[in-house]
Image: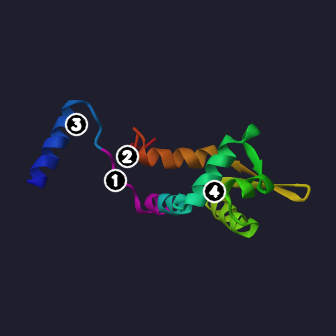
Amino acid sequence: MTTELTLLESAIAKCAGVPHPLPLERDEADELAALLKAVADPARLQLLTLVRGSEGGSACACDLTPSVGLSQPTVSHHLKVLTEAGLLTRERRGSWAWFTVVPERLAQLSRVFGQDAGRRP
C-alpha cells in the first residue's frame, strides 16, 4: 500500500509540474549533517539568532553571555562550534571577539527544508 501511495503521489506531482526532489550526494549530506549538528542545541540556536538580529549583523561575545544565561566559557564553546561549522565568522576588535552570521551557510540550511529542497542550483 505504501509503494502504491508513493507512486500515486509521484504521478500527481509530475502532472502538477512539481519536480521530484533529487537525492543528496553523500558529501553534500555529510556537510549538511555537520551544519545541522552545529545548530542542534538550544543555546547555539539562541546565539545564532542573537547574532543575526544584532545591529549591523555583528555581535560582541561579551553582549551574548547575559542574553543566554550561560557562563562565558560555555558561550565561548558554543560560538566556537558555530564558527567551525562556518555559520559564524569571528573578528578580533581590540580585546573583544565579534561574530557575524555567514548568510550563505544559513541559506544552505534553509534549502534543506525550504520550497526548493531537493532541487539542484
Q: Residue 55 shows which numbered tag? A: none
What residue sits 46% from the left and 41% below the top? 121
What residue sits 46% from the left and 44% below the top? 111
The Cα–Cα distance between marks 4 and 3, rounded to whole angstroms, is 35 Å
Up/down of 22 relative to 40, above or below: above
Q: Residue 23 shows which numbered tag? A: 1
Q: Residues within 10 Å of mark 1 (few under 14, many from 20)?
A: few
User: Does the CB distance between marks 3 and 1 fall below 8 Å?
Assistant: no
**Which is closer to the viewer, label 3 or label 1?**
3
Q: Which tag, 2 or 1, sits closer to the chain's start?
A: 1
Q: Which tag, 4 or 1, sits closer to the chain's start?
A: 1
The Cα–Cα distance between marks 4 and 1, rounded to whole angstroms, is 23 Å
Secondary-structure class at tag 4: loop
Q: Residues within 10 Å of mark 3 (few under 14, many from 20)?
A: few
| Residue 61 x %, y % | 77, 56
User: Does the CB distance between marks 4 and 3 fall below 8 Å?
Assistant: no
The Cα–Cα distance between marks 2 and 1, rounded to whole angstroms, is 7 Å
